[in-house]
Image (cartoon, grey):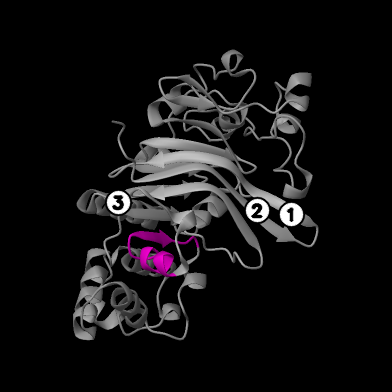
Amino acid sequence: MSKQHLLDVNELKTHFKTESGRVTAVDGVSFQVDEGEILGVVGESGCGKSVTSQSILRLFDEKYSAEYEGSVYFQGKDLLKCSKKEMQGIRGNEIAMIFQDPMSSLNPVYTIGNQIVESILLHQNVSKSEAYKKAINMLKITGIPAPEQRINEFPHQLSGGMRQRIMIAMALACQPKLLIADEPTTALDVTIQAQILDLIVRSKKELGMGVIFITHDLGVVAEICTRVVVMYLGQIVEEADIDTLFNNPLHPYTIGLMKSIPQLDSNRLDELHVIEGSVPSLNNIPDGCRFADRCEFADELCRTKEPELRDYRNGQKVRCWHAEKISLTEEEKHVPSEP
C-alpha cells in the first residue's frame, strides 16, 4: 500500500476571468508534501508560485473571477470539493499561511492581540482569557520582546521584522499540520531573515508539520529545504531533492537561476549572469516550450512542441527536450551560501 502524503496536489489548474479573456495562471501543477518536510518553490516573479499556494486554500473568488481544476488532497480529503464551511474550518487551523507583506495582511485598526485571539477563538473551543494567554505565549515563542505590552499595540507600532513574527505567531497559534510561507523574508534584512528561518524550522520540528516555502532566494532553499520545485509561467519545469538540484540541474531555466547567484570567490570585475528577456504575459503564452524564447539551447522542436514533465532518474523530474545534453560546468556548480 502506497504512503499517503500530507498534501497531494495533482494536475492543479487555476483559471481567471479577465477583460482580455480567460487566462490560466497555474497549468497542470502536481507535487506532494509530507509531514516534517520543507518543500521549496522557486522562480521569478510572475511564474505562478503565489497563485499556486493560494489556490490550495481556494482564496480566489470562485463566483466571479476564478475556476479550479484537478485535485488537492489534504490528509485524504480533496480541498477543491469541500464546501465553503469546511474550507473555513481548514484555513488558519489545519493549513496556515504566512504572506509576503505583513502590513497588508494585518488589520491596521485592530491590536495585535485582537487579531491573534480572533484566530484562536474561531478554531478552538477556549475562553477569551485562555485565548489571550495562548496569544501571549505565541508571541514569546516567536521572539517578540515584552509580549504582554506588544499584544495591545497596533501593527504600525512594530518594525517589519516584528510584524512578520506576528504573522508567524498567528499562523502557528492553532498548531497547523501544513504551513505555507509565501516569501516571508523578502523585505527583511539578513539578520532578521536568519531568525525568521530558524523560527520556521524549529516550529516545523516541534509540530511535525509540513512546510511549503515559496521564495526566489536559492540561498534560503539550500539552507532549509529538503526538496525543490522550480516553476516557470505556471508550470513546474524541474523537481528534485536539494542535493540533486544543486549538483545536477537539468532545465536551462534552473541553470540560469544558478548562474545568476554571485559567488564569493569570483572575480569582482566579472559581469553577473542574467537570464535574457522576461516572463511572458499569460495572455501571450508562446507555442512549444514556454522558456524557448529565453533559452540559448532552444531549437525548432522546442519552439513548436511543448515538452512534458518527465521522470529523469532517482525522483528528479524535468520539462525539457534536451535535458541530457545540458549541465553546469564544475566551476559553476556550487551551493549558495546561507543568508
Q: Whole-Å distance between the Cαs marked 3 and 2?
A: 36 Å
Categorize mark 1 by other alpha carbons within 10 Å: few (<14), some (14-19), many (20+): some
Q: Amino acid at mark 3?
A: Asp
Quadrant containing the N terminus in the rendered view: top left
Q: Is residue 255 visible?
A: yes
* 139 horizontally vs 95: left or right: left
Quadrant containing the C terminus in the rendered view: top left
Is there CB contact under 8 Å for labels 2 and 1? yes
State which region is magenta.
85-100
Badge 3 or badge 2: first in the primary sequence: 2
Q: What mark, if any, has residue 15 been given in the picture?
A: 2
Q: Nearer the viewer, residue 335 or 263?
A: 335
> Which residue lies under the disc numbered 1?
22
* SS assignment at label 2: strand
- Queried whether the magenta region covers residue 93, the answer comes back as yes
Residue at 64 percent across and 32 percent down: it is 271
Q: Nearer the viewer, mark 3 or mark 2?
A: 2
Badge 2 or badge 1: first in the primary sequence: 2
Q: Amino acid at mark 2?
A: His
> Which residue lies under the disc numbered 3?
198
